[in-house]
Amino acid sequence: MTTATRVAPACAAPLAAPGELDGIYRKILKRLIPFLMVLWVLAWIDRVNIGFVKLTMLDDLKWSEAIYGLGAGIFFLGYFFFEVPSNLLLQKIGAKKTIMRITIGWGLTSIAMMFVTTPGMFYFLRFLLGVFEAGFYPGIILYLTYWFPDQRRAKAFGLFMSASALAGVIGGPLAGTIMTTLNGVNGWQGWQWVFLLEGIPSVIAGVVTWFYLTDKPSQAAWLTQRERTLVQADLERDQRALGHREHSLLASLKDGRIWLLILVFFCIIAANSSLTFYGPTLVKEVGFTSPAAVGWIMSVAYLFGAAGMILNGAHSDRHQEARLHCGLAAALGAASLLAVALLLPLGALPTLVALTLAIVGTMSAIPVFWQMPNRVLAGSAAAGGLALINSVANLAGFGAPYMLGLIKTSTGSLTTGLYVVAAVEICATALILAFVPRLSRAPLPAAQPAH
């Protein structure tokens, strides 16, 4: 004789009160984004401080601009080879372990840079820095999709990514001050002190990551049970509203949209890396020779860049539109780079204004760009696909600085290189407007009341 087993119906997610989800997402934003921004500031400073130490390091070591350009760019080869494996590992073992490993690794490598004496050592450590940092940026993009639905991500992305601009605000004056005040202390050059003092905080931050970060909302002890349930239900509704998205990484590689997005981001990164590694050089070329002065001028430019990233991301969220927000920002960056090339011989003020607008346009395009692949990919395809887009596109970060260094060495001027970079970035706008379709969402199903 068998006994029938009654199965109770699954209870639907509780209904959120008006404005309740807004409050929960504000709580998540305040918990996660400031800490992630600190990590990105540290990563960015350790990545780009080479642009500031170059002002004296090249003379001390008797290196050419071509050596510098190759070393600055070779960082992105480390990115290329290790970014996809790192992001797949993050999906498997969690963000906390992955980001801790990444942060400690790049901090130790940055410290080791102070002992560089030959181009070979320089190239190796820059490559190793890229290996360790690989996976951090796309990993955070993936990580934020675990916490925020599609219509709330551009603001979260914009706030997080604005840390790269804030790093410029902080990093320039910091590097300039260290180089000026500590030069010769303990027998070390100012640029050696920069690598040491800017690498140590990253190691400490990596340890803190283990204790502070939470992998997913279901594990967040700092949310109530109701808050965890509401967020999970909201994320599930968001997944359904986005419709079918590719979950297989191998299948996504056959999707032409992914390769289109790689090409678009390649064009944006070509300009972004050029401004990152040669912005201080451009400031020096218009007459500001003090490292401290160069640092403060770049600080102001990046302050405007941070504002642009945040405002463009918030405006994109408000209007639920990413395509034009990315394309028009890239167009501003391209036009301003062209203006820098034309104005460079004419004086400091117009050149610095154009340089600032180039930074604003190029950086403002980046956070809203990441809304486009997130509407195409999910699951393993998102973990690997986001890293694939970033790693392949960041080959522009290798090529553009190297190209500028070669041109500067052979001609004594950056003008021709700036023309090339401006032409590449305007291609991003053309590709977006011509080939990226307007993306629409299915209506969100209403949350069901609790039984």
Image: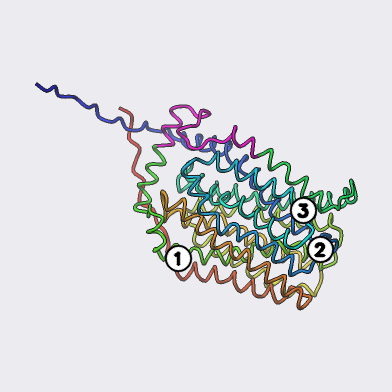
Q: CA distance from mark 3 to mark 2?
A: 18 Å
Could you tell me residue 349's position as x and y percent?
80, 66
Q: CA distance from mark 1 to mark 2?
A: 43 Å
Q: Name the chief secondary structure element in magenta.
A: helix
Instruction: Name the image quarter holding the N terminus.
Output: top left
The answer to which of marks 1 and 2 sits earlier in the sequence is 2
Could you tell me residue 359's position as x and y percent?
67, 61
Tell me, yes or no, whether the highlighted magenta stretch contains residue 211: yes
Up-down relation of residue 43 to residue 94 (above or below): below
Could you tell me residue 98's position as x and y percent?
55, 43
Local packing at callout 1 (Cα closer than 10 Å; few below 14, some 14-19, many 20+) is: some
Which residue type carries mark 1?
Val
Local packing at callout 3 (Cα closer than 10 Å; few below 14, some 14-19, many 20+) is: many
Work out whether residue 408 or residue 296 is closer to the camera in this orientation and state it: 408
Which residue type carries mark 3?
Gly
Which residue type carries mark 2?
Leu
Identify the residue at horizontal 64%, vertical 36% (top origin): 207
Work out whether residue 31 or residue 320 is closer to the camera in this orientation and state it: 31
Residue at numbered disc 3: 172
SS class of the residue under badge 3?
A: helix
Tell us which disc is closer to us: 1 or 2: 2
- Magenta stretch? 206-232
Q: Which mark is residue 436?
A: 1
Instruction: Name the image quarter holding the C terminus.
Output: top left
Residue at numbered disc 2: 58
SS class of the residue under badge 1?
A: loop
Q: CA distance from mark 3 to mark 1?
A: 36 Å
